[in-house]
């Protein structure tokens, strides 16, 4: 699907999130305790340095724009926030386990990877098309300027996740 250029930075971020989800899947499938811990640590760094910022940008810029045209509790807004909350909960659980010598369970990494993958699909197939349909060209342009300005203040540039992401370890 052709994406409006105002959403390119967020769509590019989604690619990196899918790579991370795949790495979680691979570690979960292998079910090796050292590999699970390594994958969990790598994802926790990814979350801390990049992905939570991406969620924040969607909540501060994309959802308010859509809420101008839809009820604040519309399916797209409600589902996005619900998925963000669930992923944050799983990340908190993962981080809690990483602070202890606890075993990292394969099912947690698998569930996190699946939730992240489903979330990206939802946003690309439902949220972003809803924003593109509802907002005017000028509003989309302004939203993109806000995203870029927000990212330049963090040193993340035009693609929040790309500068720090590591190549997948297959």
Image (tube, rainbow, N blue to C red):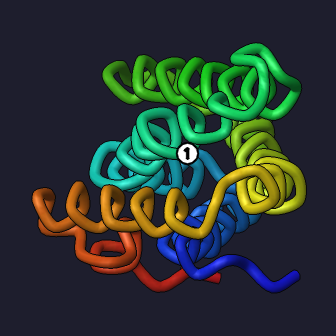
Can residue 151 be seen here? The reply is yes
Q: For mark 1, what is the residue?
A: 62
Can residue 30 be seen here? The reply is no
Position in image of residue 48 (x %, y %): 31, 43
Q: Secondary structure at mark 1?
A: helix
- Picture layout, residue 5 above or below residue 161: below
User: Which residue is located at x 58 percent, y 18 percent?
Assistant: 89
User: Which residue is located at x 50 percent, y 34 percent?
Assistant: 59
- Picture layout, residue 40 above or below residue 150: above
Is 33 on the left-hand or right-hand side of 92?
Answer: right
Which quadrant does the N terminus fall into? Answer: bottom right
- Picture layout, residue 66 above or below residue 125: above
- Picture layout, residue 55 above or below residue 30: above
Q: Quadrant of residue 11?
A: bottom right
116, 64: nearer the viewer: 64
153, 18: nearer the viewer: 153
Position in image of residue 20 (x %, y %): 59, 63
User: Which residue is located at x 58 percent, y 81 percent?
Assistant: 5
Q: Quadrant of residue 22?
A: bottom right
């Amino acid at each position: 699907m052709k994406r409006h250029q105002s959403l390119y930075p967020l769509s590019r971020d989604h690619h990196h999130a899918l790579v991370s989800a795949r790495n979680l899947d691979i570690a979960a499938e292998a079910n090796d305790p050292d590999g699970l811990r390594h994958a969990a640590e790598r994802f926790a760094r990814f979350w801390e340095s990049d992905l939570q910022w991406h969620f924040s940008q969607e909540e501060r810029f994309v959802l308010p724009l859509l809420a101008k045209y839809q009820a604040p509790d519309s399916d797209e807004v409600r589902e996005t926030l619900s998925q963000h909350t669930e992923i944050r909960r799983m990340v908190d659980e993962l981080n809690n386990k990483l602070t202890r010598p606890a075993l990292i369970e394969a099912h947690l990494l698998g569930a996190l990877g699946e939730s992240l993958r489903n979330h990206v699909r939802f946003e690309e197939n439902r949220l972003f098309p809803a924003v593109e349909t509802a907002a005017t060209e000028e509003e989309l342009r302004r939203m993109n300027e806000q995203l870029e300005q927000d990212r330049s203040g963090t040193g993340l540039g035009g693609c929040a996740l790309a500068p720090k992401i590591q190549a997948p370890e297959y």
